[in-house]
Image (tube, helix red, strand yellow):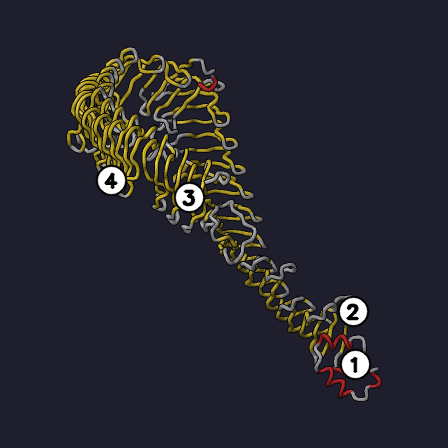
Amino acid sequence: MWRKISSNYLLKEILIYLGDGRKLNLIKYNKKLQEIAGLNLIDFRRFSGRYIIERYGRVREYNSYNDRLIFEGEYSNGKRNGKGKEYNEEGKLIFEGEYLNGKKWNGIEKEYDEDTEKLIFECEYTNGERNGEGKEYDKYNEELIFSGRYLNGKRNGKGEEYKSIPCEQNNYESSYYSYSSKKNSKNIIIFSGEYLNGERKEGSEYNYNEKLVYDGGFLNGKRNGKGKIYDVFDNRLKYEGEFVNGKKNGKGVEYSYSDIKYVGEFLNGKKNGKIKEYPNHRYFYNIDKLIFEGEYLNNYRNKGKEYYKNGKLLFEGEYLFGKKWKGKIYDYNGNVAFELNNDNGIVEGDYGFKTTIFIGENLDKKIMSEIVKGKEYDYNGRLLFEGEYFRKDKWKGKITNYYKDELIFEGEYLDGKIWNGKGKEIDSGGNITFEGEYINGKKYGYKKEYSYYNKKLRFEGKYINDLKTGLIKEYDGDGNLILEGEYLNDKKDGNVKEYNSKGELEFEGKYIKGERNGKGKEYYNNELIFEGEYLNNKRWNGKGKEYDKENDRLIYEGEYLNGEKNGNIKEYDKDTFNLIFEGQYLNGKKNGYIKEYSITDGILLVEGEYLNGEKDGNVKEYNSNGELEFEGKYIKGERNGKGKEYYDNELIFEGEYLNNKRWNGKGKEYDKENDRLIYEGEYKNGKWNGKGKEYYSKNGKLKYEGEYKNGKWNGKGKEYFKNGKLKYDGEFLDGQKNINKKK
């Protein structure tokens, strides 16, 4: 077909407007077209994946599968030589610079991940290798993970490693997150220092809170040589010394809160070899004396000497898994107190929370029911107890107590408690809590008790036979006097005064066996509210008032008889303060003539006679507007006998009641929801009987007029439609029309 083309000029014009890809598809198998187009395919292998075109002295390489440009630049001797640019399959520039014998030689390289197509590397090229400043990126989110210098393709020289973490992350050295988005993350430095042949050589490591955790040497990516470890919370120095393969190895020093704790040798991260140990300064301030020196094995004491807080020798011998096992235990005076052999003895409290030291037989190795012997010292070397122990508690022996340099108590222990002795007991605040004598385990003497929290005085008084007896004072948590009076056998007994936290007198009177009995007075806000007699902690006889202390309001005033409300009484609502009752009580119940009032506005609701707490006799009842609703007779809380009902000041029923129901008489009934009359007529035996009228409740029009029997239409009557027109005039039977009966 191409031989028939008469003008090469026309063909050239057509090829000019075609892109390289389409042009190559036309000519790459036709040498004639190549000549016409002025293109020379110096190398094309259909299945090699690329072909090369030379045009006007420059070369372009294409991918044969999709005809994408992968290189453009200078060639010589069939290879890339000179300046050029290289692209990946997506068309992104991945190298620009000079080539030599087909290799990248000098320039700038960029590398993209084949799967995610993200930029993962960019760096300078010199002499065919990565050399100079470069950066590495995460293949998922292109976050920077390294920035620094390269030599011969590897990290060499100064550099920094980065980690992308979620913004809310707050974990420490052990924290790890694989990937995070740029939106909710930040890049932090996790290492800064020197590299050699691609590995860390020396520098600083940081945790995810950007705090320094290590500073020192590295080898093959692990901590090696001299270095320092810092606390991840407060950046205090925790260890300084030698490392091998990432673990403590060689000589080193461990710190506790910036103070030296251990000095000696380490192996594979554990204390091994000669070690000196000092007190933990969190608990023992201003103590710099040695507490142990000797050998450690796998982080446990193995052999050595242990010292008291004052520097005197406490133990010398062997340990098993850090526990004293075989050797000599010394007392504070330097004498051998116990020969330890195969863990048959123990020293407790030498450098812990305890304020005393125990030396004796090993309580843990004895069965719980067996008694063991031992001694207990304070930290000044003074013997506090010597004798027998049962279940780790002092059981029987001699006891002495000191306060500062003063001997304050000495005596005997029996059955696990102080049995006999004289002296004082003093709390940690220096307050004397007891002064007197123990006889057969019971206290005899003057005692004070103080609050554990604020050291305020809570009690002071006399003990006899371990019980409060005699004049006593008690105080609240703030040290205010709340009681003073007489006790007998640990209970209030005699004349007593009680106060509130403001110091105001609340009660004064007689107690017997812990309860108010006899004459007494009660006060509220410095006002006398009751004066009379008490029995078994209850007001018994007298006049008084009661207050709701939450609202500080009077709720009752009146008389008491035999512990019940009796006589003339007034009661008030605690929220509205309104008078809600006035009248008489008998034996705690309403009796006689009374009045009851509305809680909300104090309007009279009931007035009349009560018996044993129920309405009984003549009673009047009113609605919330003060209008009379009922007047008549009640028996045992129900309407019984003659009475009258009113509605809107109109008499609506007058007759007899039985068991709270209208029984016999004439009256009216209203639908109170619609305020409409629904019935007027006669009642008998509690039902509509006789002549009457019934009305529609919604419009008030007459519904029926005639005779009733037992609440139903019965006899002569007329029924009306809702519009008032007559519906039926005739006879009814049991509420139904009786059309069979003639008028």
Query: Compared with residue 540, is residue 453 higher up or lower down, i.e. above or below?
Result: below
Q: Identify the secondary structure beneath mark 1.
A: helix
- Spatial separation of the CA atoms under disc 2 and disc 3: 119 Å
- Spatial separation of the CA atoms under disc 3 and disc 4: 53 Å
Q: Identify the secondary structure beneath mark 2.
A: strand
- Residue at the image position 32 percent from the left and 19 percent from the top: 384
**For mark 1, does the 10 Å Cα neighbourhood hold few (<14), some (14 to 19), or many (20 or more) residues?**
some
Q: Nearer the viewer, mark 2 or mark 3?
A: 3
**For mark 3, does the 10 Å Cα neighbourhood hold few (<14), some (14 to 19), or many (20 or more) residues?**
many
**Amino acid beneath label 4:** Thr
Residue sitting nearer the eye, 603 or 392 = 603
* Residue located beneath label 2 in the image: 45
Q: Nearer the viewer, mark 4 or mark 1?
A: 4
* Residue located beneath label 1 in the image: 33
Q: Identify the secondary structure beneath mark 3.
A: strand
- Spatial separation of the CA atoms under disc 2 and disc 1: 18 Å
N-terminal of the two: label 2 or label 4?
2
Q: Identify the secondary structure beneath mark 4.
A: loop
- x then y, percent, for residue 318: 48, 24
Q: Nearer the viewer, mark 2 or mark 4?
A: 4
Mark number displayed over residue 718: 3
* Residue located beneath label 4 in the image: 576
N-terminal of the two: label 4 or label 1?
1
**For mark 4, does the 10 Å Cα neighbourhood hold few (<14), some (14 to 19), or many (20 or more) residues?**
few
